[in-house]
Image (spheres, grey):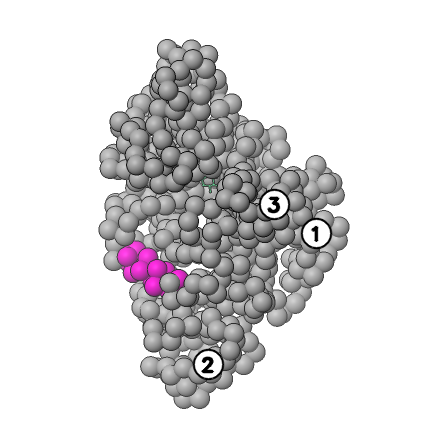
Amino acid sequence: MTKNKNWWKNKIAYEIYPRSFYDSNGDGTGDLKGITQKLDYLKELGVDIIWICPVYKSPMDDGGYDIADYYSIDPLFGNMEDMDELIREADKRGMKILMDLVINHCSDEHEWFQKALADPNCEEAEYFYFRTSKNGPPNNWRSMFGGSAWEHVGGDRYYLHLFSKKQPDLNWENPKLRKKIYEMVNYWLDKGLGGFRIDAITHIKKEPTLSSLPPDGPDGMVACFGPTRNYPGIGEFLLELRQNTFDKYECMTVAEAAGVPYEQFGEYIGENGYFDTMFDFSYSELYSYGHGWHTCKKAGEWPIVWLRDKMFASQLATEKAGAFGAVFFENHDYPRAMTKYIPDKYHSPTAQKMLGNLFFFLRGIPFIYQGQELGMTNVRMDSIDDYNDISTKNHYRIALQDGLTEQEALDAVARYSRDNARVPFPWSNTKNGGFTTGKPWLKVHPDYPQLNAEDQMKDPGSVYRFYQNLIAIRKSEAYNQTLTYGSITPILLEYENVIAYQRSGEKNICVICSFSHDSQTINLPFKFKKILLSNYPDVKINGERLELLPYQSVSAEI
Ligand code: NOJ
């Protein structure tokens, strides 16, 4: 039987951070049963594919991206029966579950690592990067979460960890390890899983000599991107992974593929690419400057044409590669999109809808991040101790080291903290937003009395209903072909506060989004045949002159 490898292309995907989605048993933490209980909510929104962040057994040093056992579910989230039930219940509704596949590193509490620590000569010691060094760490690479990428384990022995010290990197050069990984991947796919989102996968190949490099900061260290991200030779591992696992199933793979240049998009996700699709991060952190979050620029301090140009460059490179990207504006690693793109004083549900419209009709499969469909905004916590995210604590430390006061450091990290996206989902206006009957593991968003799913589902003007419309249009018989497979062309480039594009397939559709807080009139090179959606009740169009209201978006057939 030939496999349908394209089943996912015209679908809508949704990312869940399980710890914060819905708590079914009142222990304060979201769980698998909670997701199962909320499948109908997602179905009603129009979601087909659900990526759940890691639920494997884990000490939770990095939100579950530190896996202690790939074959079991962490008791925080339930057990294997709950996982099987989730897959089954999703299937019944025509939905597919993607798990997170974290195979660049595991947890230091994984059995392999424990064995490796106990006996430097055992097979498992070769599954990691252990090195000896007499004078401090074996090289000067800096880990992504700050400090040396090497951890000392006694004597002159160190191991490499690109992320936290509780996330030792796996040594992909070792064929026995690779075989164990493939077995594990197939174990999950045999359960009928829809596929995987694949974590930090561009890091699995390291520069072989693991040599020091010229420092890029006063700490004498250097960011580990150069020698460990998309390093030459990685393709052999990725191809072998695909051939031994994904190729045998009708599954979908979406790679977290930071650092892949446009010229290599085809190799990664083209016709015979390593993955079906990937997240490209080339336009996700345009605000990022210097070495800490406190040096980032705020929305409004950088021109929106940067977003436009980078976003379209990525879209066009994907199209040219004969590939199909995964498009997103939010995920569990970023602050809410509103904070990234719209100056604080102009935040509004209208602007939220405009951002939704902008990303939703791009070419590629859209991934909505939980709460995005409600227009959730950043959250402000009172003390650094209220934050859980390891990255937030690191950037707080960097800000203090750079001489900021505690208050200034808190202000800076609050804006970019990953916990902005990780706070519990507000289901209703009842206590704790209806997320839990217990004590939530992370503070709930204080806006839940006004901003929650239940109220928005009843309100025809809500952000939720806007997203529901976006999905309905994308899936409609009239526009599905165009919005899925149609080509993309940037338009109206002469207006610097507008991001607009045309999709052309069976039909022609334009999407026009204003990033101005003032009204502006623009001249269109075409006439509207039919307005599909706007975030204002009225669209002021006179022939080919369109008056765009502040942060207005308009999608129309042309
Ligand atoms: C990317 C994940 O999205 C992030 O949350 C995690 O911290 C790192 N990879 C390390 O696994």
Residue at x 43%, y 52% (from the top left corner): 288
Q: Is residue 40 above or below residue 199?
A: below
The numbered mark, 3 or 2, whose residue comes first in the sequence reads 3
Counting from the top left corner in percent of width and height, residue 539 is at 50, 81
Q: Which mark is residue 156?
A: none
Residue at x 24%, y 51% (from the top left corner): 263
Residue 318 part of the magenta-drawn span: yes
Q: Tell which tag, 3 or 1, sits nearer the viewer.
A: 3
* Amino acid at the residue labelled 1: Gly
Q: Which mark is residue 406?
A: 3
Residue 311 part of the magenta-drawn span: yes
Q: Is residue 66 something that shows in the picture?
A: yes
The residue that label 1 is drawn on is 433
**Dot 3 and dot 1 residues touching (CB under 8 Å):** no
* Amino acid at the residue labelled 2: Gln
Q: Is residue 75 above or below residue 512?
A: above
Residue at x 33%, y 57% (from the top left corner): 314
Crowding around mark 1 (Cα neighbors within 10 Å: few <14, some 14 to 19, many 20+) is: many
Counting from the top left corner in percent of width and height, residue 396 is at 55, 43
* Amino acid at the residue labelled 3: Glu
Counting from the top left corner in percent of width and height, residue 554 is at 46, 74
Considering depth in this image, is 256 or 211 the residue closer to the camera?
211
Residue at x 50%, y 44% (from the top left corner): 402
Most common SS among magenta residues: helix
Residue 24, image quadrant: top right
Dot 2: element: strand
Quarter of the figure with the N terminus = top left
Q: CA distance from mark 3 to mark 1?
A: 30 Å
Quarter of the figure with the C terminus = bottom left
The residue that label 2 is drawn on is 520
Q: Tell which tag, 1 or 2, sits nearer the viewer.
A: 2
- The part of the chain drawn in magenta is 307-319
